[in-house]
Image (cartoon, rainbow, N blue to C red):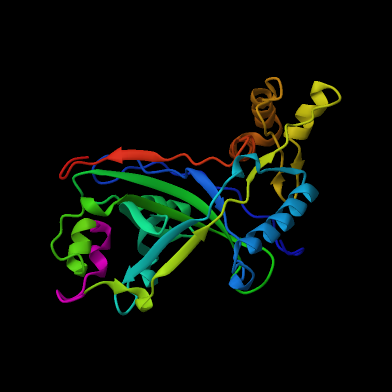
Amino acid sequence: MAKDDPAPQMIPDLHQGKYSDGHPLDDVHYLECKIILKPERFTSRQGFVDFNKLARRAAEKSDVDLSTDHLDGQRPEIREVVFLDTADFRLYNNAFILRRRISYEDGFPVGDPEVVFKFRHPDMQKAAELDVRPRIPGVHRIKFKAETLPLKDKIGGMRVLYSHNVEFGLSQLKESDRAALSALVRLFPCLAPLKGSGSDVIELVNQTIVEEVLLDLGKLGLQPLELGGDRAHALDHLVGLEPEHGIRHIRLGGAADGGGLLDEAVEAARRKAGERQQDQLLVHVQLHRLPRPAVKETVQERRHGSA
């Protein structure tokens, strides 16, 4: 982060509401941090190995564990990705992304191709209130995540986008004309405002097929909190306030809960900082107490015409 940049805001609270069918609004499931790298150095497996060394040095400087024990015998994963949009990029220009992804094993496609539909917005409430659920007779999976990304206009600093996603298998699509925008609107009613003429179609973006090469570099985990001193001092550390940034960044990782300190910290925060800061502390502790970055996925089943 650039030195003069303000501290990033924590994930705000969601104002509870419901979709048109009475289903409660989806809430953020997890945080995803993205770093955009130049591809020139990743032309072989060795490029990933070299970058892993850089990642390890950065982790050590930040007192973060980088575990690689699970990577023995790992082979790169290959996936084919295509992005779909209208010729005038109507989806992208309205914060939507539609893609299809196929996994490969030993050079051959495996499994049901995956369809992913996203709505991304810097306002979490607006992202949550848009119902991305498809009208299909089978199972779909909702993923709602906060994405931290580099700034667009300079090096250093970051921005946050909230990505409200849904995934399902391509085999569940029963439309005969999948290329028609009208068919896509029937599948995703939230796209109705984008519907133009009946002849509008969706096509490959830039007529391009993207090949993804995935290689796991390891798992990052926070070190358990070293309490030290007396309990009052540890509690004071947990709920300490800084005038500029509100709640202090804390680490409460690993399996340890700090001997019940978490519950006491919440109560102390209520007394010391008031209700608003207490809510911020709760969010911050929940993000940092995970021993590993975790993905919590909500699987929902929607029958055509019912919730």
| Residue 8 horizontal/vertical position (percent) | 64, 55
Where does the image place residue 114, in percent across and percent down from the top left?
A: 33, 54
Magenta residues (range)? 188-200
Rendering quarter of residue 281? top right
- Across and down, in percent, residue 165 comes to 38, 52
Question: Which image quarter is the N terminus in?
Answer: bottom right
Figure quadrant of the C terminus: top left
Give residue 101's quadrant in the image: bottom left
**The quadrant where residue 116 appears:** bottom left
Q: In this view, does 289 lie above or below 109?
A: above
In this rendering, does residue 198 appear at all? yes
Asked if the stretch drawn in magenta spans residue 130, the answer is no
Q: Which residue is drawn at 72% across and 32% down?
A: 224
For residue 242, above or below residue 98: above
User: Compared with residue 6, is residue 27 higher up or lower down, i.e. above or below?
Assistant: above
Count of marks placed on residues? 0
